[in-house]
Image (cartoon, rainbow, N blue to C red):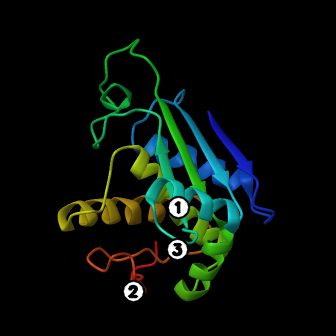
Amino acid sequence: MIEINNESGVAVDEAALAGLGRFVLDAMGIDPLAELSVVLLDTEAMTALHVQWMDLPGPTDVMAFPMDAEEGPDRFEGSHPGAEAGEPQALLGDVVLCPEVAQEQAKSAGHSLESELHLLCTHGILHLLGYDHGEPDEEREMFELQADLLRDWVAQTGRAPIRTPRAGTGGGVRDGARHT
């Protein structure tokens, strides 16, 4: 189940975000009964979370709050293809997005707010699944997977292209040659 809670005051296509979430979880082999929450907050609320949890000033674009203390891509082994039948379903956690920050990033990236929110939501889900980008090899793996998922999402839904961050740039350079 995917729950969308928009507290941001910005109109977004909540059904599309839920559809994207389902698409990403399905592509990753996560059990359809796994629960995911996507929360959209205004700048003030996102700033408070960013300060509280990351001890960093100002708002950020996306934060992920996993419900499971385990980390790494194998933390949902029982939910991936080939898992034993009857294993417990996963409560993934929360992806928190800030549309106001995403809007600024969308302008810089040269795509729509919806495209940026889809990128950020996918990024947050991958964090919930244990992916990270703190080390160069982790960043390459995560950003390539993110780009592949978004390219497949765009192909399946006919949505506008999403310019994904290039690995090795700290997310600062978007891929203009290969639109996903």
Residue under the point 33% across and 76% down: 170
Q: Amino acid at mark 3?
A: Ile
The front one of 119 and 172 is: 172
Q: Is residue 23 left or right of residue 101?
A: left
Q: Secondary structure at mark 3?
A: loop
Whole-percent x and y of residue 124? 48, 54
Residue under the point 38% across and 84% down: 173
Whole-percent x and y of residue 149? 43, 58
Check disc 2 and report the residue beneath it: 177
| Mark earlier in primary sequence (1, 2) | 1
In the image, residue 160 above or below residue 72: below
Q: Residues within 10 Å of mark 1 (few under 14, many from 20)?
A: some
In the image, residue 33 above or below residue 92: above
Q: Secondary structure at mark 1?
A: helix
Q: Nearer the viewer, mark 3 or mark 1?
A: 1
Whole-percent x and y of residue 82? 29, 26
Residue under the point 47% across and 67% down: 56
In the image, residue 122 above or below residue 71: below
The front one of 82 and 64 is: 64
